[in-house]
Amino acid sequence: MLQRVHFDQDHPLHHTTATRTLEAVGIAASGPHVLMQRAGVAVARLATAIAPHAERIWVACGAGNNGGDGLEAAALLRNQRRNVSVSWLGSPESASDDTRKSWQKAVDSGVRFLNEPPDDLGEQDLCIDALLGIGLSAIDTARQPSPALLQLLTAIHTTQATVLCVDLPSGLIADSGQLAPGFEQPGGGSTNHQSARHTLSLLTLKPGLFTGAGRDEAGTVWLDDLDLPPGDLLPSTLLAGAPHRPHRPHATHKGTWGDVAIVGGEGLRERGMGMTGAALLAATAALHAGAGRVMLAPLDVDLLQPPADQPELMLRRFDMLELEKLTVVCGCGGGEAVRTVLPEVLRRSQRLVLDADALNAIATDPMLKLLLQARASHPVHVTVMTPHPLEAARLLGTSTAAVQADRIAAAQQLADRFASVVILKGSGSIIAAPRQTPYINPTGNARLATGGTGDVLAGLLGARVASIREDSEMPTHAFAAARAACWQHGLIADGWPPNSALTASALARRLTP
């Protein structure tokens, strides 16, 4: 059944091994060539839906079964009297039996086979990428693509035509969302695609479609299970759906929604690099997200005055905070000064959000690492960490490239090592926790790539954690709070007026409880 993937509900995501298992079960149950025929029908159906008036359809087919799916679709589209041409990297002599049958159908239907990819496709045309699919995960990804494959990939990446990718955009690794070595575009990243892009994921949804480079490469994602629902096949990851919006009863008071303390904001006096704005942004976010009270404890008390437009914020010296009774957000703009307060924060805070320079300090201090890990032995303590990839790399003792190569695994490793809920920020932020299936957040866009938006997320998260009832299962609810905060943070950016600047301060004021 064909369906567009909407983000209003959770979706199970499956690793390549699970998809291969399901594929094998389907072939054993239905017999040879049946799944490829179903895939061809699904591709042709979606091609007709997204480009009903395409003047020309070009199908780029690899030598494997993904190419067979493309050949099957090409034959069906040609039988609908569409103008279809194919570039095929395979040959009848070396193709699998199923692929050879689909090639013969394409030949018999009158599909034109090209020696060179067309260079004049326009916006009114359609390009179908059936080169690799999940087949890339089964080969040595360190092997460079052949010149013939690169020629077809270049044509797909530079075309003005609408692009439909079969199963996966070619070159994307299904389980991680990264482009395989040799498949990166000029500049080392993904292409700045100018054409509309769609991906039809077959049998299962793959994690790589929703994180890392996958979001740009995949475009709009569709799913067809080819009449083989996963059933009891456990997902490796979940795509986060819209969170439940909590009801705020009339018979509540500010104590019901918790107190948030923002500890951060190094002043100019320390190193000549003032960052008090980061702490103020986090406090603003917590305030607008509905925290009962928000206390701002700057690390340089002489350099921050009460903001005239936010008299609700309460200034506190750090030594006056009752950390045990607060949800503490620590690290926003903390610089080096945050090191002086972190030991006490880690020991005493029951509900703790660690961001930015608090994470950097912990990464370089074995004693602070031990204090963070020791929090797991306190049943009432809960910790949420919000690293970006570089901060995650420092905590794990690895490189940013290694973190980005498998964002899901890196987030889970952090969660397990520090017994914390972890939000690994980036394209398709990963939310992980010990003994939980990780989530990928589907909201947000590149407009969040500006200074201070991470501080806003930390403050929003502080408000969400502060609202958790004391008699609740704290780790479970903190995990849900992290998913909800990520979703809301990204959704506001997705709905931002196109001709209006997205600044962190404006973003913080758009938050709602």
Image (cartoon, rainbow, N blue to C red):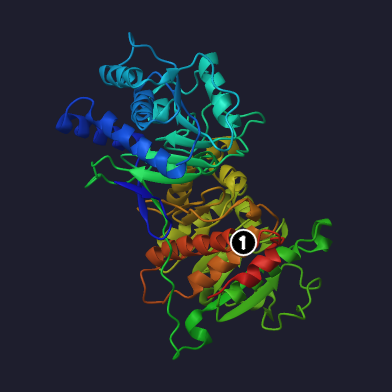
Disc 1 marks which residue? 342
Foreground of the two, 357 or 38: 38
Determine the residue located farthest toward the top in the rendered image: 93
Above or below: residue 141 compared with residue 465? above
Determine the residue located farthest toward the front in the rendered image: 81
Q: Amino acid at mark 1?
A: Leu
The reply to whether residue 40 is in sight is yes
The reply to whether residue 331 is in sight is no
Residue at the image position 55 percent from the left and 81 percent from the top:
292
Would you identify the image quadrant in which residue 18 lies?
top left
The image position of residue 248, as x and y in percent, is 45, 82
Residue 374 appears left or right of 192 = left
Counting labels gives: 1
Foreground of the two, 197 or 212: 197
Residue at the image position 27 percent from the left and 39 percent from the top:
226
SS at circle 1: helix
Residue 128 appears left or right of 150 = left
The image position of residue 427, as x and y in percent, is 55, 47
